[in-house]
Image: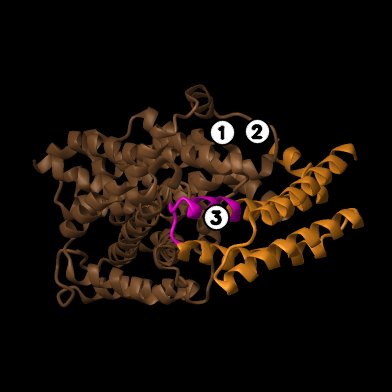
Chain colours: A orange, B brown
Amino acid sequence: MLTMWGCGQDKGVTFARLLERAASWGSSLAFAQELAQQGLVPRHYVEDLMATASQELTTLATQIDDATGVDADLKRKASAGCTGLAALAGDAARMHGTPTQSSVRELELQLRASAQQARAVDDAR
Amino acid sequence: MKNLTKIGLGILTSIGGYLEVGSMGTAIQAGAAFRYELLWAIALGTICIAFLVEMTGRLAAVSRHSVVAAVRKRFGFRFQVWPLLSQVLVDLLVLASEIGGASLALELATGYSFRIFVLPVAVLIWALLWFATFGAIEHSVAVLGLVTLSFSVAAWWLRPDWTAVRHGLVPHRPATDAAQYAYFAVGILGATISPYLFSFYSSGAVEEEWRKEDLMPNRIVAALGMGFGSLVAMSVMVVAAIVLAPRGIEGEMYQQAATMLSLPLGHWGFRLFWLSLFIGCVGAALEIALDVSYIVGQTFGWAWSENQPPGEEARFALGYTLAIVAATAPSLLGIDPLKLTMFSMAVTVVFLPILIGPLLVVMNDGEYLEEYTNGWITNIAVAAIVGLAFALAALAIPLQLMAQ
């Protein structure tokens, strides 16, 4: 039964998981900023999170670029979203600041929409 | 009072099973991805580990043998070498994760990279083992480990949907991402049914010189200790399900999950998170490093006891010293503790039959257990759960690797 479940997990789903992981970093950044504004988490934690997110998102962007068997347009859009998020987090970590929450949210939603699209294409096959 | 102090051994053992970097990490990720749907895996692992811990405590109380000493005596040195190698490998992998986890907790606390804390953490663990007695380690970790109950307070405060919680306690097929679901189930079982838990517990019971009069306290300690760990692990999953899942935060690294107590516990939430992680990891590291010395000493028939000064049992002290040195390397190389732990838990599940099979034979041997041998319920329960974990691992791990 597990093998049957697993066989259904093909390139579309694997690609969607990459995008969901990238979007998850966006959500983490937004949530941490929200908590920092209320004084519930220390400033150094938010900076550490930004630096880690930037590194992880850069790795994910490379994996998105290397993905095969997915729509080229979808891949380009997703890669741009992930790279954009990595740049926002990286800049914020370097400047000891925080990115605009709306920019983070916009890229996160873009990545989630692309993930949904990848899953939908996969379901249609 | 004497029986009350025995609970310390149960709590210390359960910290190594439930509150260390791997168990907390998998509970967070599983809760963030599948909400309450994998609570059953914690419950199943708890039943199995409570049976195993009770069995090995009984073995120590009746025969005055630890698990490894009894298996070596029953099957011979040549046989025992294979379980020893398997367990040392698993112990070193998990010890490496714990040292990394404690260092990561300090990164969260200070903002400095976890790599700079790896050596100080390793030295702290080594110094505690070198200078402290078994009792001092046992009681201090058991008391400090109570800080992890902050997850249970947070879960209660967040008012979970109890119907969904009850539903999650029953195994069922997930709506999506079945391979990931099975992989998390294996991870939870692997983190909970860790072989070092029961070899450590039986060695601890021999150190504390348990007797037949301790059989009933042993049952209570096994149930309370593992119940404590299970409660906290389930609370971690529930908090992740309520705080992280709706926000789409997967918690694949601890940096993402460190905010999970901030909503329910306010300013204290973040501090309690890293403090729980630090205490859990240091407690587990002490347990695992000691376990390496115990199992090596018991296999080779050397003198072994944490209560003796290192100068009197040099080989025992050398065992944990070398284990700590070897386990420090992955974190110094910058390998993420949580990524390492997912691998080590999968390896644990694969080795479980090799480690538990001989124990089941010993537990049914009247020469060791007299009239206290296992009943059929215990034998069937343990064999079935280990078989299930192994089958899940054999199928889910390749599927998950393919998916990545």
Residue B119 position, x and y percent, is: 37, 77
Q: CA distance from mark 3 to mark 1?
A: 29 Å
* Magenta-span inclusion, residue A34: yes
The disc label shown at residue B174, or none: 2
**Residue A23, percent from left and from top:** 68, 52
Label 2 lies in what chain? B
Q: Which mark is residue A33?
A: 3
* Magenta highlight range: A29-42
Disc 3 chain ID: A
Image quarter (top left, top right, bottom left or bottom right) of the N terminus of chain B:
top left
Amino acid on which the number 3 mark rests in the picture: Gln
Q: In the rendered image, which quarter is residue A41 located in?
A: bottom left
Q: Where residue B282 appears, x then y in whole percent?
A: 33, 61
Q: Nearer the viewer, residue B250 or A104?
A: A104
Q: Are marks 2 and 1 in contact (CB under 8 Å)?
A: yes
Q: Residue B196 in magenta? A: no
**Image quadrant in which the C terminus of chain B is located:** bottom right
Helix, strand or loop at label 3? It is: helix
Residue at (85% x, 38% y) in the render = A123
Q: Is residue B159 left or right of residue B393?
A: left
Q: Chain of mark 1?
A: B
Q: Secondary structure at mark 2?
A: loop
